[in-house]
Image (tube, grey):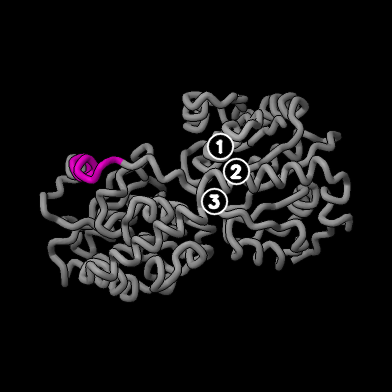
Amino acid sequence: MRVLHINNEKTWRGGERQTLLTAQEQRRQGLDSRIACRRGAPLEEIARSNGIPVISLSSVVPAALLALRRSAAECELLHCHTGRGHSLTSLAVLGQRKPMVISRRVDFAPRNSAFNRWKYGRADRVVCVSKCIAAIMRNWGLPAAKLPVIYEAVPGDAYLPREDCLKELRERTGLQSGQRIVGNVAALVGHKDHATLLRAAKVVAARCPDVAFVVVGEGERRERLLSLRKELGLEATVHFTGFIPQAHRLLPGFDVFAMSSCMEGAGTIVLDANMAGVPVAATAAGGLPELVLDQQTGLLAPVGDAPALAEALLRLLGEPALAQRLARAARQRAEQDFSVATMARRYVELYRELLSGGQNARSAGGKRVMIPDA
């Protein structure tokens, strides 16, 4: 089976990592999986270095459409990993009837436009990475039969030893030996809500002066966050490292992992923290409560509630037995329920269903798919 994965994003974030992991594991399982991605983007370089065939897409739309159309004609099934990739692919294969699978990773409804109604009607399955997203897409108008849930996954074997992590983190931030670290890995964009994390850090710092916060990531909110850090008097407490390639490998250097998102489709970095044995405190945004079971595999706080997030962090820092119990349970669940092999196999099963089931399988149970206006 030849499958073309499409992701034309410029940057390297969770969706790009999941695209790579899916294609990589499917090749191990015997599929001829390929990746169509933007020329010069990190995904292109990383996919090539991992031996995955790559189709480079120009940033010039007509040229990208032509290259994608040619590549799609050679494949049996198309798997789009981003909204832009979905749009581009839908246009590129006009006149072709290739099965098309979409991975939906964001916890908000598509804009209600004629084009979106058309492109989602064209898709054979819209795979949601959390039940939260599936509910949003049902409310938007897609039938439940078209919305399987396949959770994302992490490999769990790409972490550095703790001392190596600490050495690199100290070199990047100037942290002193003996300081405990609350870490966060996320792009500095609005929906990650780092402002709430900084306000929680203010509370934690007042009670635990030996704790430092390390935020790994880059993005459009950086200057605003630096200003807020100054306003809160946290220059010596909160450290921004900027973008670090493969930042998840440094997770064992954190004593606690914090996730402060106000919107989050899934948030697979918390699974990395689970696999690395780091206890997690997170907000209950989007699909996060499906990954972090409150009081069982981590602690949850209401979205935007800095004092509650601070209290969760303080509990994990101040109650080692609790932190260890939650971390152990989280790792066990991540190994059992969120393996890359399981994720890739579920996608392969879906592909085979679409390819072997004829028109009924490819139209959500044989019914015509209609998307009403929101």
Residue at numbered disc 2: 344
Residue at numbered disc 1: 25
Q: Residues within 10 Å of mark 2 (few under 14, many from 20)?
A: many
User: Are dots 1 and 3 in contact, CB under 8 Å?
Assistant: no
The N terminus lies in quadrant: top right
User: Are dots 2 and 1 in contact, CB under 8 Å?
Assistant: yes
Q: Secondary structure at mark 1?
A: helix
Residue at left offset 32%, top offset 48%: 216
The numbered disc on residue 152 is 3
Residue at left offset 60%, top offset 38%: 7
49 or 320, which is in the foreground?
320
Return the x and y of residue 204 as percentages of the image width and height: 22, 69
Determine the image quadrant of residue 295.
bottom left
Classify residue 56 as left or right of residue 175. Answer: right
Q: Is residue 262 above or below residue 52?
A: below
Looking at the picture, which amino acid does disc 3 mark?
Answer: Glu
Classify residue 250 as left or right of residue 21. Answer: left
Q: Nearer the viewer, mark 3 or mark 2?
A: 2
The answer to whether residue 202 shows anywhere in this view is no
The range drawn in magenta is 160-169
Q: CA distance from mark 3 to mark 2?
A: 9 Å
Q: Earlier in the sequence, mark 2 or mark 1?
A: 1
237 or 102, which is in the foreground?
102
Q: Earlier in the sequence, mark 1 or mark 3?
A: 1
